[in-house]
Amino acid sequence: MTLLERIQTVAVPLALSLVVTLAAPIAVFAAQPTVNLGTTSGFAVLAGTTITNTGATTIGGSAGGSLGLYPGTSIPGLAQITRSGAVHISDTVARKAKDDLVAAYNDAAGRIPVTTIPTELGGTTLSPGVYDSESGTFQVTGTLTLDAQGDPDAVFVFKTSSTLITASDSTVSLINSGRYCRVFWQVGSSATLGTNSRFVGHIFALTSISAQTGATVQGQLLARNGAVTLERNTIMNGICVVGPAVHVSKLATPRALTSGSGSVTYTYMVSNSGTVDLSGVEVTDDKLNTVEYVSGDTNGDNLLQPDEVWKYTGTMRLTATTTNIATASATGGEAVVTDTASLRVVVSTVNGAVLPNTASPWFNLLLVGFVLIVLGVLGWWGTARKMHE
């Protein structure tokens, strides 16, 4: 056999093998779809046995600021929770939400393929995907950065067979179009959010969730079987938007005045529901002269990031039922974005009669006319009495 023949004998099978190899399908993992929340989407907090609260807690958000409990029957500290949604205690709505929570929990728990990583998430930057812990627990000390790599639909799923614990002043940060509505935490037992921590995502806990003093959450706290414990927290359950967007929730304390006129404190929760940092944030109210910034810009950069919630307050004295409108405005890139929220505070007398809305011109006219008539009658009666004497 000549040298040429020997080369051909080796080369031809090698070439065929290379062609077959290149033609073979290449395994590519598809992007993770979002977890279907079902009817739980309208609940900022959902629990099994009880929801307890200590101090002033604020709950809002465009997706829903409701509280749900099933099969428990008690929410101690409810009166100190300022909320934008309803309260459902062991009713059909809460039961359906609990069923949907079980489905969402099982969905997240079954996600594959899974990347196993160390327990400590703080100080790391992670790309979209499904992660579990080599020790069965996750903790966040410092800052965990979730990098969506420019994809606003990027999904992050974290799975633990045991606990999730975040340290005091820790942060879960979103960058490059990351959105809190695409972050999910499936926790095999209980979750604890440390004092003054900033957290994003939907927590599905098998047992319980504790949000310690001052913890802020962009997302949901959903506990299947146990309790949710709150202590002066801020929870925003918002709808995410691609691009620049701002959202404002307006709440009142008290929600109604049942013994006539009185002072009402309005709380405005402003969040970035989009994927672009916002500058020049401003909040106004059509019935208040002053609305003041309180807190939220944790890094002091004057930019409202998608993982921040800024709080504003304003106070006024109401003498009649009043509806006022708050407007939040900001700039994202080249666009100016706004959002509004209206709120009606009912003012009633001791016997329960509702005092009409101060914004009704006919009421003001009738009131002035009534006063003039009364004054006229009193004047006539005084004159007649003097003539009689």
Image (cartoon, rainbow, N blue to C red):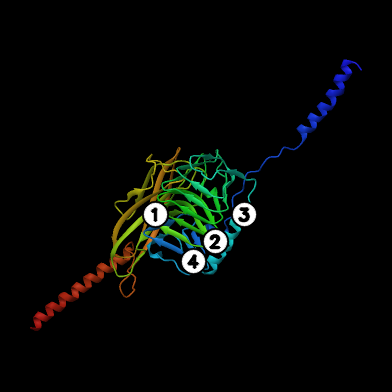
**In whole angstroms, how far apart are the C-alphas of marks 3 and 4?**
25 Å
Residue at the right extreme, as displayed: 1
Q: Which residue is mark 2?
A: 224
**Helix, strand or loop at mark 3:** helix
**In whole angstroms, how far apart are the C-alphas of marks 1 and 3?**
31 Å
- Mark 3 against mark 4, which lies toward the viewer? 3
* Residue 54 marker: none
Q: Amino acid at mark 1?
A: Thr
Q: Earlier in the sequence, mark 1 or mark 4?
A: 4
Disc 2 crowd, CA 10 A, few/some/many (<14, 14-19, 20+): many
Residue 342 x/y as whole percent = 40, 57
Q: Which residue is mark 3?
A: 107
**In whole angstroms, how far apart are the C-alphas of marks 2 and 4?**
15 Å
Q: Which residue is mark 4?
A: 88
Q: Earlier in the sequence, mark 3 or mark 2?
A: 3
Q: Amino acid at mark 2?
A: Arg
376 and 339: which is toward the camera: 339
Residue 118 x/y as whole percent = 55, 43
**Helix, strand or loop at mark 2:** loop
